[in-house]
Amino acid sequence: MFKLFGKGSDKRSEGDVLEVELQKPVDCLCDFTYNFHWQHKGKKLDLSWKIPENEYTFGDLVEHLKNGGDVKIKGDAGHRLGSSMGNDLKYFGGRGEAIDVGNIIVDGNVDTRMGISMVKGQIYVKGTMKGPIGNLVEVVSDKKGYKKFRSITDVVSNGLKGDKLKKCRLTGKKLTIDDGIVRDTVGARLDVDAEVLMNGNADLSTGILMRRGTVKINGNTGKNTGALLNGGTVIINGSTDDFTGVDMIKGTIIIDGNAGKFMAANKKNGKVIAKKGSPIPPTCRKNLDAEDRALILNLGFNPGDFVKFE
């Protein structure tokens, strides 16, 4: 059951906790997209749906976080916990900007893809997390017995705010991630002139919805690398899976390897520079111009090995 403390005002104060007890793992708790509602139009999940064996709805949890309250989950959480947390999504009438939110506290384990595309807030976990995780780094916890995670995008945009990183380091506006954990959505929605460097392989949607800055992966990445890219630069020092640059609006993606099949599907603008790849028309293969060659040289690559898809 839920326990809601201080539910007397429209704007909840810091420390206000909404508590939910789970009998078994539930997917998409505190998911600001409601499992990408715009794709299924409420058939898979809706704001109004009640969480199994509980009084409150999926929408109640998200709104509580938006109002600055914390959500405490007693039990194991399922997949995609805290997806797009801290985003005021236009689809739901928001401004499309990052917003301050409360925290998620889990007294149990969490399944895969925790914190995908997350930009604000903090997640505390007492148990274990299955990989891949989302756009998160671990910091030293201020809650005994819990691991604490913050958004990569938040750390490089707004600083550590007194937190200390674990197995990562922030130097100015450059965040280096060396913990060996596989992640989705690295650098999601980055909109500052900062750099995220991750050593190791990443999974889905690296650099999704970026507007400014640079995300570099020293390893391979999964599908949808640079999806909906709206500025900035994504550099993959390896190969990517299919649908690289899908729905890309502008910006640059550089791949020191194979960019996969169905590349640049529905691309509006921007360019993909890679050694190999199979684009979707009207995107086609072109030779590098002088500006492209200078960019590749500056990054330490041999421009003779690359072609442009534009």
Image (cartoon, grey):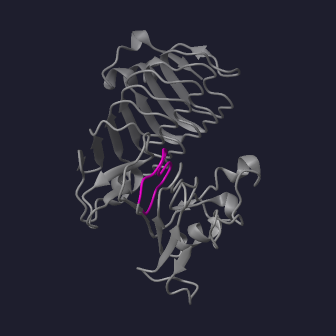
Q: Is residue 111 magenta?
A: yes
Viewer-nearest residue: 206 or 228? 206
Q: How many marks?
A: 0
Q: Residue 139's image quarter?
A: bottom left
Q: Which quarter of the rendered picture does the N terminus lie within? A: bottom right
What is the residue that sits farthest to the bottom in this orientation?
A: 8
| Residue at x 44%, y 39% (from the top left corner) | 132
Q: Position of residue 172 (x, y in %)?
A: 25, 51
What is the residue that sits farthest to the front in this orientation?
A: 23
Mark yes or no: residue 288 visible: no
| Residue at x 43%, y 63% (from the top left corner) | 121
Using residue 67 as the reference point, say whether residue 125 is left or right of it: left
| Residue at x 37%, y 56% (from the top left corner) | 150
Q: Residue 214's image quarter?
A: top left
Q: Position of residue 268 (x, y in %)?
A: 66, 34
Start-end of magenta stretch: 108-121
Using residue 221 as the reference point, say whether residue 139 is left or right of it: left
Q: Is residue 8 above or below residue 81?
A: below
Prevailing SS of the magenta stretch: loop
Viewer-nearest residue: 44 or 197? 44
Q: Which quarter of the rendered picture does the C terminus lie within? A: top right
Mark yes or no: residue 23 visible: yes
Viewer-nearest residue: 46 or 13? 46
Q: Is residue 280 above or below residue 57?
A: above
Using residue 171 as the reference point, say whether residue 233 is left or right of it: right
| Residue at x 34%, y 18% (from the top left corner) | 301
Q: Position of residue 23 (x, y in %)?
A: 55, 61
Q: Is residue 291 above or below residue 21?
A: above
Q: Is residue 218 magenta?
A: no
Q: Position of residue 195 (x, y in %)?
A: 34, 43
